[in-house]
Amino acid sequence: MVEIKPLDKNVSIMNQLATDQSPVVLINLFDVAEEDVHALIKAWENDANWMKKQPGYISTQLHKGISGSTVFLNYAVWESVEHFKKAFTHPEFQNTLKAYPSSAVASPHLFETVAVTNLCTGTLVP
């Protein structure tokens, strides 16, 4: 089963699920032993196919570190925190976490886009 480790030591994914924002981007970093790379990809594929069918899901992409890295980054876009929360806390999804190799550590975190003049659209940061 995958170990969940906060990406931000001050704000856990569970804290973020209590907010009301939209849209949001999930960034999930995975670290896994080299011998478990294929098992991680298979478990992620099953989860992604399940998430893809959930209300509010927009898109996802999995990335792998280069040069022999066993770090993966999942980037997923959701219509809102509420949509993601319903999918993430669903018992069926939570049960699928058992399929991940025991060496896997996941660090999920929700983000909003930031507006930067002439570069990015999004929310203005005060």
Image (spheres, rainbow, N blue to C red):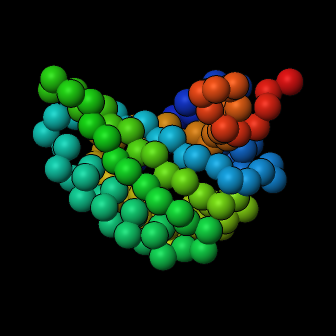
Q: Position of residue 86 (x, y in %)?
A: 65, 67
Identify which residue, 80 or 42, lies in the foreground. 80
Q: Is residue 68 above or below residue 77?
A: above
Q: Is residue 74 above or below residue 99?
A: above
Count every numbered label the image shows and give the total.
Answer: 0
Q: Quadrant of the C terminus?
A: top right
Identify which residue, 63 or 123, lies in the foreground. 123
Q: 15 left or right of 86? A: right
- The residue sitting at the right extreme is 126
Quarter of the image holding residue 123? top right
Q: 103 left or right of 81? A: left
Q: Position of residue 21 (x, y in %)?
A: 77, 51
Q: Position of residue 35 (x, y in %)?
A: 13, 39
Q: Residue at (60%, 58%) from the top-left corner?
A: 78
Quarter of the image holding residue 104? top left
* Residue 3 shows up from this direction: no
Identify which residue, 121 or 73, lies in the foreground. 121
Q: 125 left or right of 98? A: right
Q: Residue at (38%, 39%) from the top-left corner?
A: 73
Q: 58 left or right of 105? A: right
Q: Residue at (43%, 36%) from the top-left corner?
A: 29
Q: Position of residue 72 (x, y in %)?
A: 33, 38
Q: Is residue 104 above or below residue 20?
A: above
Q: Residue at (33%, 66%) from the top-left corner?
A: 46
